Amino acid sequence: MKARKEIIAGCDVAIDKASDFFDNEANLAKKVGVSKQILNYWKKNMSLPLDMALEICVATGGKVRLEELYPNRSKTIKKYNLMIKGRYKKENR
């Protein structure tokens, strides 16, 4: 099943913020398991799969919030944020 994509205004800025967290886009792409070209495609087309938004949020330890990556999903964000914080704390103990 393919991940659903939506047009997400502003996700390009959040992807840049995540790239800065890892020093560059190549490092971010490697961390979330995609190519740099795919990352640039998401930025250019403002079309980010929700599962990748979650991966980026988790990879940055919540420094880049899900609200920034997927602002049009505000109703479910609180639930995801709680899940992400719990996973990050477990992985970094």
Image: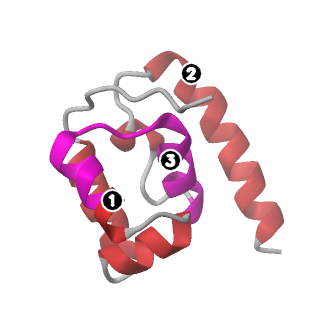
Question: Between disc 3 and disc 2, whose residue precedes?
Answer: 3
Q: Nearer the viewer, residue 32 or 92?
A: 32
Q: Are marks 1 and 2 in contact (CB under 8 Å)?
A: no
* Residue 25 on image: x %, y %: 32, 73
* Residue 65 on image: x %, y %: 44, 47
Query: What's under tag 1, amino acid-wise?
Result: Leu
Which residue is rendered at x = 45% and y = 38% of the image?
49
In the figure, is residue 87 to the left or right of 22? right
As for residue 50 lying within the magenta part, the answer is yes
Q: Nearer the viewer, residue 22 or 36?
A: 36
Give the prevailing secondary structure in the magenta stretch: helix
Task: Write down the quadrant of residue 89 in the picture.
Answer: bottom right
Question: Between disc 1 and disc 2, whose residue precedes?
Answer: 1
In the figure, is residue 87 to the left or right of 55? right
Give the number of the mark in front: 1 or 2. 1
Please give the residue where the numbered disc 2 appears in the rendered image: 76
* Residue 15 on image: x %, y %: 31, 57
In the figure, is residue 90 to the left or right of 41? right
**What crowding class fits label 2: few (fewer than 14 Cα within 10 Å), some (14-19), or many (20 or more)?**
few
Display coloring: secondary structure
Under tag 3, what secondary structure?
A: helix
Please give the residue where the numbered disc 3 appears in the rendered image: 52
Please give the residue where the numbered disc 1 appears in the rendered image: 39
Give the number of the mark in front: 3 or 2. 3
Query: In which quadrant will I find the C terminus?
Result: bottom right
- Which residue in the rendered view is the most extreme toward the front? 1
Up the image or down, 47 lies above or below 92; here it is: above
Which residues, given as a range, are shown in magenta? 39-61
